[in-house]
Image (cartoon, rainbow, N blue to C red):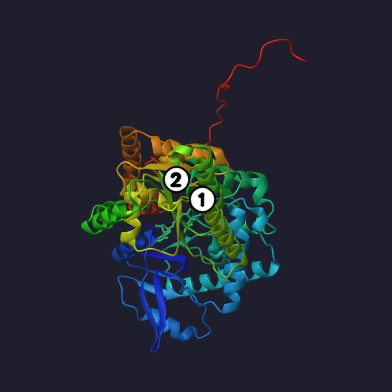
Amino acid sequence: MTQDARLVVVSNRLPVVLHRGRDGWTVGPGAGGLVSALGPVLAHRGGLWIGWPGVAAEDAGELDRAVAETTGDYGLATVPLGRGEVDDFYYGFCNGVIWPLFHDLLGHCDFNPRFWRAYLEVNRRFARVARAHARPDDFLWVHDYQLIHVAECLRSEGDQRRVGFFLHIPFPPLDIFLNLPWRAAILRALLAYDLIGFQTGRDQRNFLDCLRRLLPDIELSRGGGLVTARLGGRDVRIGTFPIGIDYDAFHGEAASAAVAAREAALRERLGDVAVLIGVDRLDYTKGIPERLRAFQDALERHAELRERVILIQLLVPSREGVPEYQKLKTRVDRLVGAINGRFGTPSWVPVHYLYRAVSRTDLLALYRVARAALITPLKDGMNLVAKEYCASQRDGVLVLSEFAGAAAQLRGGALLVNPNDIEGVADAIRGAVHMPEDERRARMRRMRRRVRDEDIFWWVDRYLRAAADRELADLRGPAEYLPRVDYPPPATEPPSGPSEA
Ligand code: ADQ
């Protein structure tokens, strides 16, 4: 691949939103970090985006035409999926096997062989569409866990073009990965790429561990900022590329008059309380019940917080048809009810809970108003909310899970917590509420600088440079974050006197 080769992005979802009206499908632009980062690169170099339009359709032709007729800065090509495929591939394999397993949540996995077959078939289809649309010297950039097999499907057709892969979610440790019935196939499929990118050093280390243990013939070497894996005469580069956000857009918009007005209105209504926020897609990896229990514990043990803090928890509905997600919703509903019932007063409701997506203006106003953001996933590839909060804030506190990929970059300013340690998180909440302003500002300044310097455009550029040069001359990037084991001194001296031993 040369620096100016065309780029073809392959991801599960196309960067568009579809609506079915009376006159057929209408296609609107999608939102999100990936779209705003890759859009300009695609427009500048030329290229196209290949993906599923996000709706199961048996009338694929009509959908295809609507998407293909969309005029934009770059081309779009659809990979249609029928209802059964959405069930077995998307809900079954992607969200019922890889998603929980890669987040270390083995108990949520359903290793149904039918799901695996559907996944392989859909990946073959993505590869076929890519071959049909891409030119031989295009660089293909495949995204995320739904499409691990695309390169291997291309190779099996004799296609030797350069193909890169980026995993947005974590890569699990060896002992967890070993549970996957298709572990060898998944590892070999990853090795069909030319460049594999991970979010953090943790994920890369887990992957390299799996390679060493499961493929003893593999040769691994380090150099030029990347690891090279050599197997059967093929070289694969492996690197760490922490994804960022469009810092300037968030920072600029957070300072806009519209957001300031919304922030002032919110502040006026909420009164003189310290606002804590949680912003998540409703998912069992995000540690939402654990966070609510920690908030409850903080109110229980630190009575001075009562009537002085509120938690605003935003949850975007996600995978609503899946019973497991419905159960999680019920659990969250109950916990919120229990906390409000136990601690609420006629003039104070401890948890404000919104189960819907909110507008960008509202989201930014909430980020601005919040004394602290509670971002406590059990495990997360990166967590962009943490970075969005930093880009929008001046003196807020970030309470951040050690198991979010973002911890590697934001450890210099965040209050890092183990999300399973209910009392530890409760104490961090208290610490955030009482933290003096100068410390809050200093911590936030450090984090904001990092989020600004390592933004989404830095991420795209680093990845594409590694793909073109096969090395990363600029080594700058976060070192792996490893949770510390602290042994605090005992609060009281152990009793002296004769021991019973
Ligand atoms: P996600 O798991 O979807 O992404 P995340 O990175 O936190 O998680 O992004 C969520 C996005 O949704 C944020 O941009 C946030 O602003 C938005 N959002 C959340 N709640 C909202 C609400 N109520 N209203 C409006 N918007 C809301 C996957 C991985 C992550 C990784 C990303 C990118 O799981 O670990 O960071 O990909 O690589």
Q: Quadrant of the C terminus?
A: top right
In the rendered structure, the answer to whether residue 5 lies left or right of residue 166 reads left
Local crowd size for mark 1, using a 10 Å CA cut-off: few (<14), some (14–19), many (≥20) = many
Q: Classify mark 1: helix, strand or loop.
A: loop
N-term mark: 1 or 2: 1
Which residue is depicted at the point 53% across and 57% down?
337
Along the viewing direction, whichever of 115 and 374 lies nearer the viewer:
374
Please tell me whether residue 271 is drawn above or below residue 25 in the rendered image. Answer: above
Q: Which percent across, then down, holds residue 25?
A: 40, 83
Q: Which percent across, then down, holds residue 89?
A: 59, 69
Quadrant of ligand 1 in image: bottom left
Q: Which percent across, then down, holds residue 310?
A: 42, 49
In the rendered structure, the answer to whether residue 486 lies left or right of residue 388 reads right
Along the viewing direction, whichever of 69 and 248 lies nearer the viewer:
248
Query: Does the beta carbon of the residue at mark 2 sit less than 8 Å from ligand 1?
Result: yes
Q: Which percent across, then down, holds residue 113?
A: 70, 67
Along the viewing direction, whichever of 233 and 157 lies nearer the viewer:
157
Farthest residue to the left: give it. 257
Please tell me whether residue 99 is drawn above or below residue 302 in the rendered image. Answer: below
Q: Quadrant of the N terminus?
A: bottom left
Residue carrying label 2? 406
Query: Does the beta carbon of the residue at mark 1 sit less than 8 Å from ligand 1?
Result: yes
